[in-house]
Amino acid sequence: MVCMVIVLGFMSFDTPKLVRVNLDGGISILIPKGWRTMDDLDFTERYPSVRAPLAAYSDYDRLTDFSVNISATQWPDANATMAQQFFKAAIYNSFDRVDMISEGVREIKGRQYIYFEFESTIRGNRKELGQQESIMRYSYIQYLVEPGRTLVFSFHCPRRSRADWQEAARLMMEGVRVKKLKS
């Protein structure tokens, strides 16, 4: 008699190994090992903006990404509380639906960062070919408001992948390092 044993393994997504990348302007970030740099065309196709990012990276499938940008909005006094309300309103105005997971101001290496972790939905347009489906995403956006510049660190992935990427996104945001601007 031959006995067959079937073992079912459940694939679990482990937090990927993160590597430090140094950017211009005294900024360093953590990104998953193996991610590629987005080219200008890739970034503008996915995130139309007047300003090119300082850096943008994507996973192999081009579904999950992380970018660093300088916001056009500047706060002369680096008032994090006022800036937080402004950025929160901008997030809610950018999507048809926002489910905020967490938000606040926290200190990382002596610097105050504003953060928003949320799920969003942009409803599709049933009349537009190729745009009928809603776009549902998990995002983690973090801002560093300094006199003269506001840095924006953005992580995005499909909502269905949130459980796979949430811990990595948090570690990436906690790993941001920015040298203080010289007066």
Image: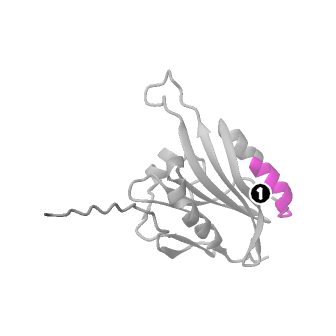
Residue for point 68% across, 45% down: 99
In this rendering, the count of numbered labels is: 1
Q: Position of residue 125 (x, y in %)?
A: 53, 26
Q: Position of residue 123 (x, y in %)?
A: 58, 32
Q: Is residue 91 left or right of residue 43?
A: right
Magenta extent:
77-88
> Helix, strand or loop at disc 1?
loop
Q: Is residue 80 left or right of residue 10?
A: right
Does 144 sit above or below residue 50? below
Q: Position of residue 31 (x, y in %)?
A: 51, 69
Q: Label 1: which residue?
A: 74
> The N terminus lies in which quarter of the figure?
bottom left
Identify which residue, 169 or 34, lies in the foreground.
169
Q: Position of residue 75 (x, y in %)?
A: 81, 59
Report if residue 83 lies within the magenta region: yes
- Image quarter of residue 114: bottom right
Residue for point 43% across, 30% down: 130
- Image quarter of residue 146: bottom right
Helix, strand or loop: magenta stretch: helix
Q: Is residue 6 left or right of residue 26?
A: left
Q: Amino acid at mark 1?
A: Gln
Does 176 sit above or below residue 65? below
Residue for point 60% across, 53% down: 139
Identify which residue, 139 or 66, lies in the foreground.
139
Q: Is residue 36 left or right of residue 101?
A: left
